[in-house]
Amino acid sequence: MSSPASPTGAPPPIDCLGVVGVGLIGGSFALSLRRAGVVRRVLGFGRTESTLHRAVELGVIDEAAGSLAGLARCDLVLLATPVGQLPGVMQALSRHLSPRALVTDGGSTKRDVIDCARALLGAALPRFVPAHPIAGAEKSGPDAARAGLFEGRPVVLTPIRETAADAADRVHALWQATGARVMRMEAEAHDRALAATSHLPHVLAFAMMNALAERPDAEAMLELTGGGFRDFTRIAASSPEMWRDICVSNRDLLCAEIDGYAARLAVLREAIARGDGAALEREFSQAREAREALGRRLANEAAR
Amino acid sequence: MSSPASPTGAPPPIDCLGVVGVGLIGGSFALSLRRAGVVRRVLGFGRTESTLHRAVELGVIDEAAGSLAGLARCDLVLLATPVGQLPGVMQALSRHLSPRALVTDGGSTKRDVIDCARALLGAALPRFVPAHPIAGAEKSGPDAARAGLFEGRPVVLTPIRETAADAADRVHALWQATGARVMRMEAEAHDRALAATSHLPHVLAFAMMNALAERPDAEAMLELTGGGFRDFTRIAASSPEMWRDICVSNRDLLCAEIDGYAARLAVLREAIARGDGAALEREFSQAREAREALGRRLANEAAR
């Protein structure tokens, strides 16, 4: 599904990195590239004065740009805003971006970002390399940003046919400089995979949390939760706005995953209803084996 | 739903604690009471010679009993075996238990254990105090046992009308000596609550793990999982045998929870399908609020 990482050289030195949206992803990208010695200066863009101010205070960015016209000063731009703000930013890029500057993003879905880029980026389109760093957390904002966020984490690039090969290679090398494992996929394959591995679990956790919270005896019920429930629902504390956008943007593939999952759950429910211990033990044993294999792989990655 | 902890005095000193099933729960109970200075000697019972040997080696028990006849030596017995072994052990208790000895258990479901006790414990029934320590982990066996396992964790007692009041109070004090927060509930209320807070999340996690593991591109998909997926599926590594027994034993209440959850998921799916961002944001915001409240409560408990 993913192609092997293409050979890339050293990351190109970046004189001025522009980060649009100085939250967890944008801030961590800036801190990571600065730590790697790749970036000289970081310019932050955003709607909220206080967030930009805080990002300067934390040393996440060097300067808050007064307007999107400042994009003209950047030779690399990371788009890390909520999806809803992308059209405005893309239009500004088409007007202001300097002719050799690169653009990448941190969006959780890729087909929608690519549609938007094709419609609005104009001459800058070949230098846009869509990316998804799989390193989210339920925390957000510049205070959550840290230089190590992407270390050993997958970052999926989904270059399109319009993408210039050298732009893809340079952006590839820059993401690698953050410590990430960079891979490349088709945008639709990415969105389908993430619907299964990320969007569906989030929807299930949100639903689980609400199913409990709405009960009349919710307080007493929550007294009885253990570590399993705590871990299972951790992702239900994720940003409602971000997950609203992800679910709407990826709704076709996500609904297909929900349907497949609901059918599977219905089969399991029937086995439970008829007390079919053998079928349940088979199902649970297979799940444990798969989960333990995943645990070993994650432990190996962490140890590398 | 739960009644406030009844006033209890110091835990009664136990000359000989019998632990049937020297795994995570049984072993930790022995270590906890020993640390509290409540227990003089621990006698271990079990089917597997090597496990008993290991438990002695680890200092979890002092001695492995040759047979269930050894129950006669104990003044407190904890039943911590898989549900399937309970009938045999209960019959042995009815024959061997000394007249003032107490019995409690660590089973995850309570109606089935109580049915079994009513059928088989005979004269010992009034001194049996059903209990469920909510402190499971995906690990098992005597090597996983530790003295701190129950600290700050809820332990639910579900005494029945046959239970002697003084037996309930003494067992209450003993569980409290492990550091647990002890509460009392009706067995059916317990089983209903746990179906919602524990059994349902486990079933959902098992199903999620298998939905992914069975895909032809499972390997590549698992490459793309993040911390959210890892936490969400951690409980899918739990014991298949234990969860088979729990699901079968609690199937009526669990199926009701699955049905309620599936209906809720279907509503959410429709909101996603029609791209209803406002409804999704409402749902996700409510979930986040509830999850953050739970997180604060758990942090406070851990700090106490």
Image (spheres, coloured by chain):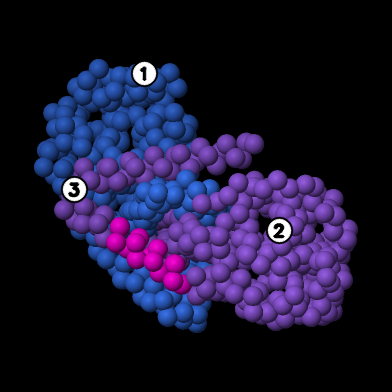
Chain colours: A purple, B blue
Quadrant in the picture for residue A203: bottom left
Is disc 2 surrounded by few (<14), some (14 to 19) or many (20+) residues within 10 Å? some
Residue under label 2 = A165
Q: Label 2 lies in what chain?
A: A
Comparing labels 3 and 2, the label whose residue is closer to the camera: 2
Image mark count:
3
Height in image: A176 above or below B21?
below
* Residue A211 visible here: no
* Residue A102 visible here: yes
Foreground pick, B128 / B279: B279
- Residue A272 disc label: none
State left or right for residue A21 relative to residue B217.
right
Comparing labels 1 and 2, the label whose residue is closer to the camera: 2
Foreground pick, B100 / A174: A174
Question: Looking at the picture, how far across and down is residue A219, in whole percent?
Answer: 42, 66
Question: Looking at the picture, how far across and down is residue A231, in whole percent?
Answer: 48, 53
SS for callout 2: helix
Foreground pick, B239 / A23: A23
Residue under label 1 = B53
Q: Are marks 1 and 2 in contact (CB under 8 Å)?
A: no
Magenta stretch contains residue B290: no
Residue under label 3 = A276
Magenta region, mostly helix, strand or loop? Answer: helix
Q: Label 1 lies in what chain?
A: B
Quadrant in the picture for residue A262: bottom left
Is disc 3 surrounded by few (<14), some (14 to 19) or many (20+) residues within 10 Å? some
Question: Looking at the picture, how far across and down is residue A229, in whole percent?
Answer: 43, 55
The amino acid beneath tag 2 is: Ala
Question: Looking at the picture, how far across and down is residue B132, in whole percent?
Answer: 33, 47
Q: Are marks 3 and 1 in contact (CB under 8 Å)?
A: no
In space, the residues marked 1 and 2 are separated at their CA atoms by 64 Å
